[in-house]
Image (tube, helix red, strand yellow):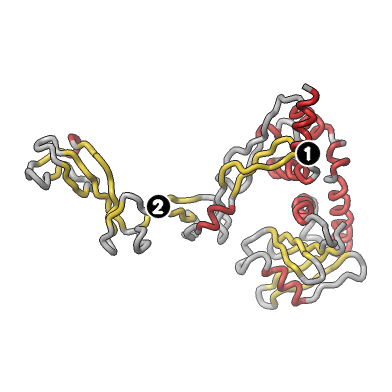
Amino acid sequence: MPREMHAIWWDDHLGPMVGRSCPEGASLSVEEALRIFMGHGINQEAKIGYTNLGRGLVVSILIPPNCIAVLLNENEDPQVVERNLLRLVEEMNLNSSHWESELSRAFDRLNALLSESSKDEILARDDVRRLVNDMMDGRIESIEPVHVLRQTDRYPIASQYLSGDDEEVARTLRDLESAGILVAKSHGRKLTCTRCSSTEVVAGLACPNCNSTDLYKIYRLHCPNCGQVTQSVIVDNMEEISCQHCKAAIPVQELKVLGIEMLCNSCSTATPDPLITLTCASCGKRFSSLDILSGTGLAFELSPAGKKERAEKA
């Protein structure tokens, strides 16, 4: 179980402020509070933060201006704590005028939630048992997400069994993974802007030589008059082009496109393989390779032990 819980908040003029702590005698310095806030990013864009204070790992959840920080015991699974911390804040009154009692209740409730997500407790739930039994009987082979380009994955099959909203269903599946009942496997990608958390993405093209986005399309075309291959830029309102070889005027609607190259207006590089760029539609941040690779959607299957047991039953 976690060692400590701290309520801190951010003041735009004074910086990090330390409020109540649990259990009695627990303390947090202003410097440690600052490090915890930094764990949420320079602009405090991340809802969940991880901070190593030297005396232990802290998992924190930021709901501006409030932040609830939990100091873990050694060998405690931080992802299990994170999931239950997300459950906890849905029950907390972050505007309470009695923070001492509110935090004390929250600390006890977090410990209760952690107990409820243990293997024995989670398998005692009727909805979980029905899901696992149907997987053991072969009626469900894999629990796959939909809308993997959104920040929150949905699991329609699991939602038919498990109680709670989409986020709670996903957390329960991760609890089952931690308990060794299910295993998670990669299933597509989901993209979320690390600056503003938007999931709206705009795809574009860029020059592979200078990275400019000022590009023209150069069409390789078959001339129906002389049979030669010609090249041309075609803009939206163009009705005809002239063949480079026979100089004949060719109506655009009669052209046969053989290929397309991109011509950079900045460095004059022509390429059939421009860079594909992904940009946040909200704040304009261009996604890096790390941004793209970090958003992996997950599907869930029975663990190898579960599959072996199912095969033996068959």
Q: Amino acid at mark 1?
A: Ile
Instruction: Relative to 68, say whether 304 is above or below.
Output: above
**Callout 2: helix, strand or loop?**
strand
Image coordinates of residue 113 in percent, x first then y, are: 84, 49
Image coordinates of residue 188 in percent, x first then y, are: 57, 43
Q: Amino acid at mark 2?
A: Gly
Q: Residue at x 77, y 59 (%)?
A: 94
In depth, the one of 176 and 98 nearer the eye is 176
Instruction: Relative to 271, say whether 13 is above or below.
Output: below
Residue farthest toward the right in the current orientation of the protein: 24
Image coordinates of residue 270 in percent, x first then y, are: 27, 55
Answer with the quarter of the image where residue 154 lies: top right
- Judged left or right of residue 296, residue 203 is left
Q: Residue at x 73, y 35 (%)?
A: 302
In depth, the one of 85 and 260 nearer the eye is 260
Sort mark 2 into few (<14), some (14-19) or many (20+) by Cα contacts within 10 Å: few
Q: Quadrant of the N terminus?
A: bottom right
Q: Residue at x 73, y 68 (%)?
A: 9
Quickly name the residue at label 2: 204
Residue 276 visible at all? yes
Image coordinates of residue 199 in percent, x first then y, are: 54, 50
Answer with the quarter of the image where residue 197 lies: bottom right
Quickly name the residue at label 1: 181
- Judged left or right of residue 71, residue 202 is left
Q: Quadrant of the C terminus?
A: top right
**Callout 1: helix, strand or loop?**
loop
Answer with the quarter of the image where residue 71 lies: bottom right
Q: Estimate the spatial distance between the alpha carbons at disc 2 and disc 1, rounded to whole Å.
A: 42 Å
Q: Nearer the viewer, mark 2 or mark 1?
A: 1
Q: Residue at x 16, y 45 (%)?
A: 230
In depth, the one of 69 and 141 nearer the eye is 141
Sort mark 1 into few (<14), some (14-19) or many (20+) by Cα contacts within 10 Å: many
